Image (tube, rainbow, N blue to C red):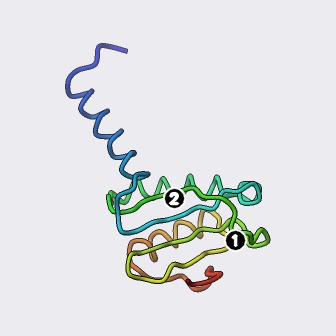
């Protein structure tokens, strides 16, 4: 690998800043992936990876991603909660990569609750 240029360093800084913003405390939308041991065993890591991929492609800075513990509903894992400021939170159950993509694109980005996957509201 050759020497890094100023442009290379600026690009690295931009990418790092963007990743920090994705996981930061900014934003009026929060997506919580419940990653207790039961959630991880049920596939929560894949759900989180998919969410981060979608978030990186969406180029939104107002979305906060949080990993959290178990909700106490192990039989419905992996669970994901979507909280949009001013709206009732929605908990999604039995999530996988495809369901996460759909929830992200429709609920997180467009505000359309995906009732087929919803466990509870509020």
Q: Where, quadrant-wise, is the N terminus in this rendering?
A: top left
SS for callout 1:
loop
Location of residue 24 with respect to 115 vertically, above or below: above
Which residue occupies 38% across, 81% down? 86
Q: CA distance from mark 2 to mark 1?
A: 15 Å
Decide which of 88, 47 is in the foreground and name it. 88
The quarter of the picture where residue 71 lies is bottom right
- At 32% from the left and 33% from the top, the residue drawn is 12
Q: How many marks?
A: 2
Return the residue found at the far right. 75
Displayed quadrant of residue 110: bottom left
Quadrant hosting residue 36:
bottom right
Mark 2 surroundings: few (<14), some (14-19) or many (≥20) residues within 10 A: many
* Quadrant showing the C terminus: bottom right
Helix, strand, or loop for circle 2?
helix
Can you give x and y, in whole percent of width and height, for residue 10 in the image?
A: 23, 32
Q: Residue at x 77, y 68 (%)?
A: 74
Mark 2 or mark 1: whose residue is earlier in sequence: 2
**Residue contact at pointers 2 and 1, CB within 8 angstroms:** no
Of residue 108 and residue 105, the one placed in the foreground of this image is: 108
For label 2, the residue is 51
Position of residue 33 measured from the top left corner of the image (x, y, whole percent): 59, 61
- What residue lies at 38% left-to-right and 75% top-to-bottom? 85
Left-right relation of 11 to 22: left
Image location of residue 5, percent across then percent down: 23, 20
Which one is nearer the viewer's eye here, 47 or 88?
A: 88
Q: Position of residue 89 (x, y in %)?
A: 51, 78
Which residue is identified by label 1? Answer: 94
Q: Residue furthest toward the top? A: 2
The circle drawn on residue 114 is none
Please indicate whether residue 117 sits to the left or right of residue 41 in the image.
left
Residue situated furthest left in the rendering? 6
């Amino acid at each position: 690998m050759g020497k890094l240029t100023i442009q290379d360093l600026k690009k690295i800084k931009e990418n790092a800043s963007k990743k920090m913003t994705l996981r930061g405390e900014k934003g009026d939308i929060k997506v919580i992936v419940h990653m207790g041991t039961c959630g991880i065993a049920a596939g929560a890591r894949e759900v989180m990876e998919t969410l981060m991929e979608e978030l990186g492609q969406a180029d939104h800075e107002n979305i906060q991603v949080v990993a959290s513990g178990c909700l106490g509903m192990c039989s419905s894992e992996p669970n994901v909660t979507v909280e949009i400021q001013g709206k009732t939170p929605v908990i999604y159950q039995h999530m996988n990569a495809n369901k996460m993509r759909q929830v992200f694109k429709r609920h997180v980005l467009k505000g359309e609750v995906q009732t087929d996957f919803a466990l509870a509201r509020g």
